[in-house]
Image (tube, rainbow, N blue to C red):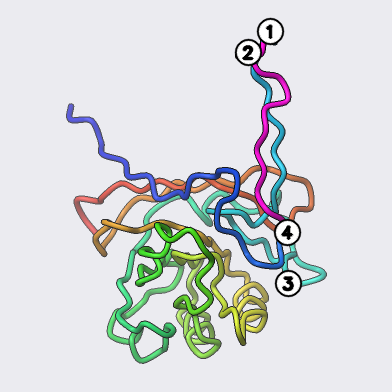
Amino acid sequence: MQQRKWIDITVTIKSGMIHWPCEPVVRIKRRQNMDKKDSSNVSFISMSAHTGTHIDAPLHFIASGKGLDRMPFNATLGKVRILEIKDRQCIKPKELIPYRIKPKERIIFKTVNSNYWKVNKFIKNFVYISPEAAGYLISRKVCTVGIDYLSVGAYHKDGAQTHRILLKAGIWIIEGLNLKGVKPGYYDLICLPLKILNSDGAPARAIISPRSKT
């Protein structure tokens, strides 16, 4: 039997990596180091729950929302469709309508953002999901939405609004994906966050595998 191909679409966590400007700098330091004659290697990690590839829980913007430890597995496990977005400003309903998005779909957006991971600074004008597109996704009754930068909402405006629209509707959000070199289409998705009690978000490992059939 041919071994199945899996593609890692996770951003590697490392010290000093790109992060949301108001959040803490990522620091990873060896507290015990075998190179210094310690008996083992033990690392200390300091970072935001929304570092790199991560999942947002409703609790992130909805005070009464679920924590990430209560996320159903089917939110981020199973068939996913990757849609390539041409608009370099934001995702708008008019670009989504031709895709005929179906209820309960998991949708990931590939944009020009995937080119920004090679730039060692935060890009403020990344492509985001407009509030109008968020409303459209709700009307299509999607299950999960993912995007290839650190937020589904804009940096300069509407960021909180887009989050609230999606999360209030029960849509789970994956942020910080790296889709460089990934073709649009149907895949199987495995994306599981750390299980942290009452967490508003947590880093996750995300991998996809091409589907032979839609």
CA separation, marks 3 and 2?
A: 42 Å
* Residue 34 numbered tag: 2
Q: Are marks 4 and 1 in contact (CB under 8 Å)?
A: no
CA separation, marks 2 and 1?
A: 6 Å
Assess disc 1: are there few (<14), some (14-19) or many (≥20) residues with their C-alpha within 10 Å of its C-alpha. few
Residue on which disc 3 sits: 61
Q: Secondary structure at mark 1?
A: loop
CA separation, marks 4 and 3?
A: 8 Å
Q: Nearer the viewer, residue 78 or 89?
A: 89
Q: Which residues are magenta?
A: 24-36
Residue on which disc 4 sits: 200
Give left or right: position of 68 versus 15.
right
Of the image marks 2 and 1, the number of the one nearer the N terminus:
2
* Residue 148 numbered tag: none
Assess disc 3: are there few (<14), some (14-19) or many (≥20) residues with their C-alpha within 10 Å of its C-alpha. some
**Position of 150 relative to 17 (above/below):** below
Q: Nearer the viewer, residue 5 or 148?
A: 148
* Residue 39 numbered tag: 1
Question: Mark 1 belongs to which amino acid?
Answer: Ser
